[in-house]
Amino acid sequence: MNSIQAIEERFGRDHISSGRIQIEIVRSDAGECLGFKISDNGIGFNEQNLESFVRMDSQKKVLIGGKGVGRLLWLKVVDSARISSVYESNGEAKRVVFNFTVDDPISDIQRTQATLAEIGTSVALFPYKDVYAKSIPRRAGTIASRILAHFISYFVNISQPKIEIHDDSETLDLFDQFTEVTERDQDFKFTLPLSEGEFEFVCHCFLLPKSISDDEKSTNALYLGANGRAVKRYEMDAVLGLKAIDGKYAFLGYVESEILNRTANETRTEFSLSDDDLEKIVDAAKERVKQFLSPEITEIRERQKAVVATLRMEHPRFLSVARDPDEFAAKLHLSMQQEEEVFVELSRQSLRDYRRRKNAFLSSVKKKLPDIAKRAQEYVSGLQDESVSSLAEYVMKRKLILEVFEEGLKYASIEERKSEYEEVVHDIVCPLKSTSEDLNYEDHNLWIIDDRLAFFSYFNSDKPLKAQVAAPANPHDRPDMTIFDASLGFQNNDCAQPITLIEFKRPKRDDYTLEHNPITQVRKYVKDIRQSGSAIKFDGTPLRQIDENTPFVCHIVADVTPTLKSVMRDLGPFHQKVGSGTWYRWDDAYRIFIEISSFKDILDSAKLRNRVFFEKIGLA
């Protein structure tokens, strides 16, 4: 930066491209980086500059942002800096050489004559102290990238000093390096009417690796410049809705115009244009920025559309909010690309639409406005849309659950022809080791077995009998599911209320015997529950009475394989429902109704019962 400022002082800010800066990497014999030597063709250490250098409280560079302490940091990194400088004085060239140290800022100073062709300065910053030397990148290319990142605003300008890095036989031109890493660049010309007349502008756009963005206050930036120098900076993150483009790029732009050259102040920090004129220029430039980034923005919009479309299908309650997925996605902030972010925005818009309709209706009522009928119709219509969307979502979830249930019926290992354990299917219908106290209506899928089972008062899933009834004979037995009544909201102590048992068996199982089979198993459960006399909740709270006349309905979900058919003949008779894989009988000895349904029959029946809903929302 000192070299750039010296070049500006010698050639003027409008001719900064006349400057030359060389950065030499100083290495040890082993190739380790020891430090740097920086040379320039700037104005040099004339008497005024030398006097400013010696003074610790120098204010010479205050107007250009200098703090007067930068050179002190050199001595944190090196023990001393060797400075050699040639400057012009009364038409003659003079050389001054000295060491900059903590004890004496111009130690061992020497003055000699020189030639005008040698005007400039070199500063030797080596060897670095070990703790800092270890942090210097080894490769010249990496060092070049670090310097580019720090001075990027000079390279997006139209003019800059020529900066080279020398490393033994390798020479890197930083502008060439900038050109090489630039992913894409394009110029946009436009004309604007301002208060002083109509003027032409050029917006130079660059897409760069994020690692070398200026990253001052934001990743993406737009500069208004004058005579090849940046004057005002505008952050573009909020405009684009992105901090990093495609996660790895940054946008930097530079706007130039004759009117900007003419109205910039001497220190290149402001323009004398009105705020309205500046706003008009920036707004026009922003449109060119979006045009330049249209390929990336289009790609983001396509991803957003896909997310919105997916969420509409998975959560149909958003159908009324995002009737047109493309239109909704086009209004999203470009930074909203994750599914969760889009979901939150859909929810937010749904709430806002509801509040808007409700407030409009209430306002009409309060003010007795003549459009009250219209407002009421809009309000009710909106509620109907939301209700239909919510119902559609519920139906959609049912379809997805049935698809998962169907997957659970396939072989877990096709080669070994092994099926999933019954617990897998059981957990789909209702979570294991739970009660109705643990779950909401939406947390179970008992409707797969029978829609009437969805409306229960209390159930147990995979709980031991000792947590279900008082003093059971076999306290550790675990019926898969016990539903103590099926009338939600109408609990009573009527012993005639039916109790439902559900027992799952592994799909495709074919090793049943008269001793080990689901029919004998449910009979045993019923006998134990009846003898207990009362049902309790998991915490011991009495739930209902049970006597010899309490009816039981037992659903056995199992594939009717040859061994199960054999058991059914011996313990039957069982009757088959016409056109189905379901068998049933009234077991008079135990006073229970037993229904045996294959997994396929359960699935087909559930699909059939829900088909009309699937068709209505286009899911069939």
Image: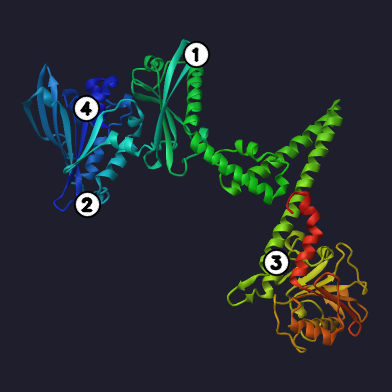
Drawn side of residue 445 relative to residue 196, left or right: right
- Residue 363 image point, x, y percent: 80, 31
First along the sequence among labels 2 and 1: 2
Give how far apart the Cα atoms at labels 4 and 1 are. 46 Å
Residue 561 visible:
yes
In the depicted view, which residue is nearer to us: 544 or 454? 454
Q: Name the residue under label 2.
A: 130
For the point 52% across and 40% down, the residue is: 299
Residue type highlighted by circle 3: Ile
Q: Residues within 10 Å of mark 1 (few under 14, many from 20)?
A: few
Q: SS class of the residue under badge 3?
A: helix
First along the sequence among labels 2 and 4: 4
Q: Name the residue under label 1.
A: 193
Number of the front mark, 4 or 3: 3
- Residue 579 image point, x, y percent: 83, 69
Q: Name the residue under label 4.
A: 52
Question: Is label 3 in contact with label 2 (beta carbons under 8 Å)?
Answer: no
Residue type highlighted by circle 4: Ser
Residue type highlighted by circle 1: Pro
Q: SS class of the residue under badge 4?
A: helix
First along the sequence among labels 4 and 3: 4
Number of the front mark, 2 or 1: 1
Hey, which residue is sitting farthest top in the picture?
197
Q: Residues within 10 Å of mark 3 (few under 14, many from 20)?
A: some
Give how far apart the Cα atoms at labels 3 and 2 are. 64 Å
Please tell me in which quadrant of the rendered image residue 550 appears.
Answer: bottom right
* Residue 428 image label: 3
